[in-house]
Image: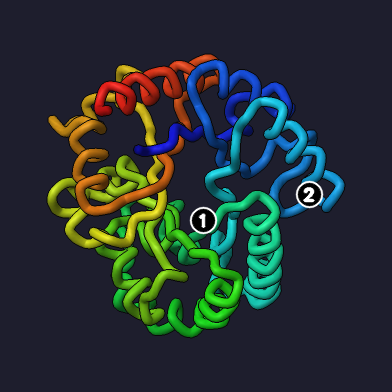
Amino acid sequence: MIDVCVFADEVSKDFDEAVKLSVEAGANTLEIRGGIWGKSVTTIDDDDVKRMQDVLTKYDAKVAVIGSPFGKCHHDNQDEYEQHLRYFDRMVELAHAFDTRVIRGFAFWNPNRRNKEAGRPNIDDYIDMIAEKLAPIVPVAESGNVTLSFENEGATLAGTCEETRKVIDALGGGPALSSCWDVNNGLHCGEMPMPDGYAQIKGLVTHVHVKPNRDKNLNPIGATNITYEDLFQTLLDDGFSGAASIEHWGSPELMLEGVRQLRAAIDGMS
């Protein structure tokens, strides 16, 4: 069955409170990014990690995903790029500390992200650069037994499932590379989630992000007639084993409502 997950920092900036409230609402796993007593996954030290582990044990919760910012940088800024390479080394350490394989990441900033009229760049014009720049990460992920799970995000060069697949293929594929499927992000880039988007990443999905529709409800997905139950069942039928994270529902209260809706949907499938 699919684990119910939530971005902890959108529930509370106090990690203890975030875990407590999330578990009470029905989550059994967390995606960690920020809100860690004033720190983020890029700045926490080993003492912070131990404190987090104690909190997770107290509430019988686990970390499903390291919500890292890896790859949200300018591909042509060498200092930023090298900093993100160092980030990834630390994310592998955190994945081991929290007993998860999944590290969320991205494929560099979309240079048109602040110019809506410019449209999405053609990823084929950037794919060789992406492959070259991200190639050093692959052996690190392989040796660490983790997977870099690319979130399709319109602000980056891989905004759709099709673009994500091109990135993964350019890097040679394999278990160290996978898809963090943000269904709504793909929709916002003009890609229908099913069957179009999913056909590109079938067998590659290691994590799912769940955002609300305009009515702040789980279903339907965006302006489609697709439900998350449909999507989850398709994933499960194809062997998916992982978590789905509530994200960007608008407020801590709405985030917890999202967790409750997601819990009800998943429990209703069993």
Which mark, residue 185?
none
Q: Percent from the top left, x then y, of residue 222?
A: 25, 32
Residue at 59% from the left image edge and 42% from the top image edge: 63
> Label 2, on which residue?
44
Residue type, label 1 = Val
Mark found first going from the N terminus, 2 or 1: 2
Task: Give the Cα separation between the discs numbered 2 and 1.
Answer: 18 Å
Q: Percent from the top left, x then y, of residue 220?
A: 21, 26
Q: Circle 2 sits in a helix, a strand or a loop, which is it? A: loop
Tell me the quadrant of the picture where the C terminus can be found.
Answer: top left
Q: On the picture, is 198 further left or further right than 43?
A: left
Location of residue 11 with respect to 169 vertically, above or below: above
Residue at 62% from the left image edge and 44% from the top image edge: 33
Q: On the picture, is 90 further left or further right than 248?
A: right
Q: On the picture, is 134 further left or further right than 229?
A: right
Q: Percent from the top left, x then y, of residue 176?
A: 46, 70
Depth check: 116 or 24 in front?
24
**Mark 2 surroundings within 10 Å by alpha-carbon count, few (fewer than 14), some (14 through 19), many (20 or more):** some
> Label 1, on which residue?
102
Quarter of the image for residue 87 reads bottom right
Q: Circle 1 sits in a helix, a strand or a loop, which is it? A: strand
Residue at 30% from the left image edge and 72% from the top image edge: 166
Tell me the quadrant of the picture where the N terminus can be found.
Answer: top left
Does residue 64 appear in the picture of this structure? yes
Residue at 53% from the left image edge and 45% from the top image edge: 64
Does residue 118 appear in the picture of this structure? no
